[in-house]
Amino acid sequence: MAEQSAALSPLLKQATPVLAARGEGVYIYDEDDRRYLDFTAGIGVTSTGHCHPRVVEAAQRQVATLVHGQYTTVMHRPLLQLTERLGSVLPEGVDRLFYVNSGSEAVEAALRLARQATGRQNAIVFQGGFHGRTMAAASLTTSGTKIRAGIGPLMPGVVVSPFPYAYRLGMSEEEATEFALRELDYQLATVSYPQDTAAIFIEPVLGEGGYVPAPAAFLRGLRERADKHGILLVVDEVQTGFGRTGSFWGHDAAGIRPDIIITAKGLASGFPLSAIAASQTLMEKAWPGSQGGTYGGNAVSCAAALATLDVIEDEGLVANAAEMGERLQRGLAGVAANHPVIGDVRGRGLMVGNEFTTPDGSPDAEGATRAHKAAAEKGLLLLTCGPHGNVVRMIPPLIVTADQIDEAVDLWSQAMKEAAA
């Protein structure tokens, strides 16, 4: 057999030029030991920072005892302990869990449960939402056509309704909320008959769609309509959960209780783990054999998740996310005041976006790309998002300090000056 060399798919483009050698807290170091302030957190995954000592110790201890115990074959203690522990942070009554590996898998599990439990087929999603890349999850996703292009026909039964994106709509938050709820009512009257509608899927903050928070009144309006029509409200907390928004769950500020919660990303500080949570009454309506998988609820990931919960509680990281998020938004608003190309600074907690627009209000992806690149050169790692790639987002680990926030704002200010030159 002839020798050959393999390489990564050419479609895997790096957002930054860094070849990471190690991570520590809020920092990543490359192979030349240059330090970068990491405000990507692995797309919101390293919630307790890179290699938090307590998470590392828990994972190392678990690796030495049991790496994999397939949970429909044998049960293991970390999974049982994590399930019990999550009961203390989940809404009352939403206390039955099913574990998988990724956000997409959890979204598909939630959709499967909703359809089986209700006997209905349709799902309503909102424009700009991101729910994953697997086939059903991609069918629910409208954050950008790149997720859906070239793979049709997509799964039927998905209805897309407007999201209250006030800046894009040129409305106040109140006006955008009223508009989006009216349009949802219109969808239920014209496209998706309520008795055919199984679930409404919503992100408390649009992720890939541009870091746009859902107003509390909008989430409450969804709950009211779901209750009225017997529709399940599924809240996709893959990116917003575990303290990211300054409350433990992104929906907490609205005072609602979802029927199904989807969680992943920050759940295990970088180890692959995701889950859906629902009530006993709802979960037992899933059909036999509809929940399972080889790697779901991996023992090492569960041990890391338990340590993550300990760190979040003991170090007050939810409150820190709220406080540092306010500091970050204030600093970024100050930078934006000197650079009109940044049309909007918005977010919730440590999930903040800077939207770049031209003087006529059109998306400015080139401006966002220049600023993003300049920031990396200065030592600040960021990501872009939004349907047009014109939003630069900041997602630091929840352990970030005031000094690190100020350092990031300073580097961002320098990057903006360079990008504008």
Image (cartoon, rainbow, N blue to C red):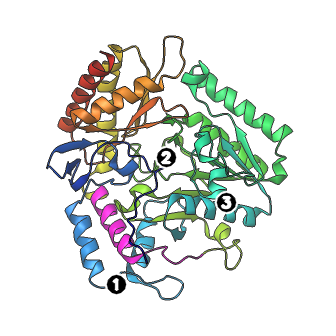
Q: Please, which residue is most extreme toward the top here? A: 359
Q: Amino acid at mark 1?
A: Leu
Q: Identify the residue under disc 1.
A: 66
Q: Is residue 41 above or below residue 71?
A: above
The magenta stretch spans which residues?
Answer: 292-312
Identify which amino acid the numbered label 3 is placed on: Leu
CA gap between label 1 and label 2 equals 35 Å
Task: Indicate the secondary structure of the residue bearing disc 2.
Answer: helix
Q: Residue at x 42, y 65 (%)?
A: 272
CA distance for labels 2 and 3: 22 Å
Residue at the (34%, 62%) spot, across then down? 309
Q: Quadrant of residue 134?
A: bottom right
For the residue carrying disc 1, how many other residues have a C-alpha within 10 Å: few (<14), some (14-19), or many (20+)?
Answer: some
Q: Position of residue 201 (x, y in %)?
A: 64, 49
Which is nearer the eye, 3 or 224? Answer: 3
Q: Which residue is mark 2?
A: 252
